[in-house]
Image (tube, rainbow, N blue to C red):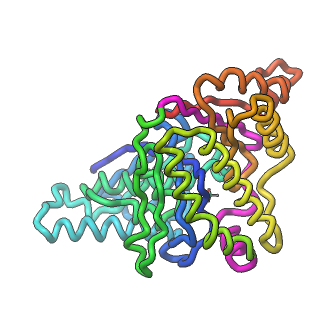
Amino acid sequence: MKKVTCTAPVNIAVVKYWGKRNEDLILPINSSLSVTLHQDQLKTTTSIAASRDFTEDRIWLNGKEDDINHPRLQSCLREIRRLARKRRSSGSEDVSGILNYKVHICSINNFPTAAGLASSAAGYACLVYSLAKLYGVEGELSEIARQGSGSACRSMYGGFVQWLMGEREDGKDSLAQQVEAETHWPELRILILVASAEKKHVGSTAGMQTSVETSPLLKLRAESVVPGRMAEMIESIKKKDFESFGQLTMKDSNQFHATCLDTFPPIFYLNQVSQRIISLVHRYNAHYGQTKVAYSFDAGPNAVIFTLEPTVNEFVEVVKRSFPPASNGDPFIKGLPVSPAPLS
Ligand code: PMV
């Protein structure tokens, strides 16, 4: 038997990916850019064992057996095994003969799954990386992670990462690329405000599909807004210009949710708590006359707050005051824990 265990962190997009031009290969209609969290924060841990005693491939997610025949899971398994076979035929030996063995995969998230906190990004990045380690496959793996879940390709790198949409029909140029390393902007901090840990009602796959079919705003965004925004975002990161980084982040999150509303029937990911957080951030920034904090929301109501180290304590106090402790003495209102997630 051979066994490997790996962890992969969540990434939070500041220029959002929404919409595919090819469903099978997961090729996006626009490029996107994200910040990968620190490994000690929100993460997936995956263990994979390969043994001659196993009679079939199996997978457990958060302790419950799941469907190994899910097409995207199968794509990742097939692609990594194909690379491993290629490697073997080019002379590298398959030391333990594990390519002929079945695998058992066990994957655990340390945060709510499918609640709009990029669980599939960390999950598929971790799966692909662990499989590659198991079979001794090296090199560019973001193309394979992308075929599990689009945003997963960005979790293959730390720091600031762009996913280039690419032009080719076979997806060979639709890859993730590090823009700056995790050490680049040490003062940057990320807070997660959990407005609801419930599973989202419309998954990203179904949501994107309806948006591509029905939203004229999404087409306009992909063609006319995102290319310029990617360039501006990269510049603001390189210059560590929080004013510009924060504004672009909020505008992009707002436009993504506007395309959801422009989808027919409309998709609502934000709830009343999310809306209160948005107003709070704008009031806080208006008080200082500058962008001190910025919000971003994915396909769910939970807020991701970007800020710089000196602002963290004060903003957390402001959040606590706006969402007072529950009467049972819990430090935070029920359902709204605040967890500072330093990026280093
Ligand atoms: O990779 P998916 O299918 O989970 O889609 C992710 C979509 C967003 O999280 C809303 C945006 C993004 O770029 O991560």
In this orientation, which residue lies closer to the viewer: 91 or 164? Answer: 164
Residue 134, percent across and down? 30, 53
Q: Quadrant of residue 243?
A: top right
Residue 46, percent across and down? 44, 47
Query: Outermost residue toward the left?
Result: 91
Which residue is pictured at 48% across the width and 35% down the height?
A: 185
Residue 332, percent across and down? 78, 25
Residue 319, percent across and down? 78, 28
In this orientation, which residue lies closer to the viewer: 275 or 9? Answer: 275
Which residue is pictured at 85% across the width and 25% down the height?
A: 324
> Can the viewer see residue 15?
yes
- Magenta segment range? 186-214
Quarter of image, ligand 1: bottom right
Would you say residue 104 sits in the magenta stretch? no
Would you say residue 204 sits in the magenta stretch? yes
Which residue is pictured at 61% across the width and 58% down the height?
A: 16
Query: Outermost residue toward the top?
Result: 329
Which residue is pictured at 69% across the width and 48% down the height?
A: 250
> Can the viewer see residue 45?
no
Q: Along the horizontal axis of the image, is 62 left or right of 335?
A: left
Numbered disc total: 0
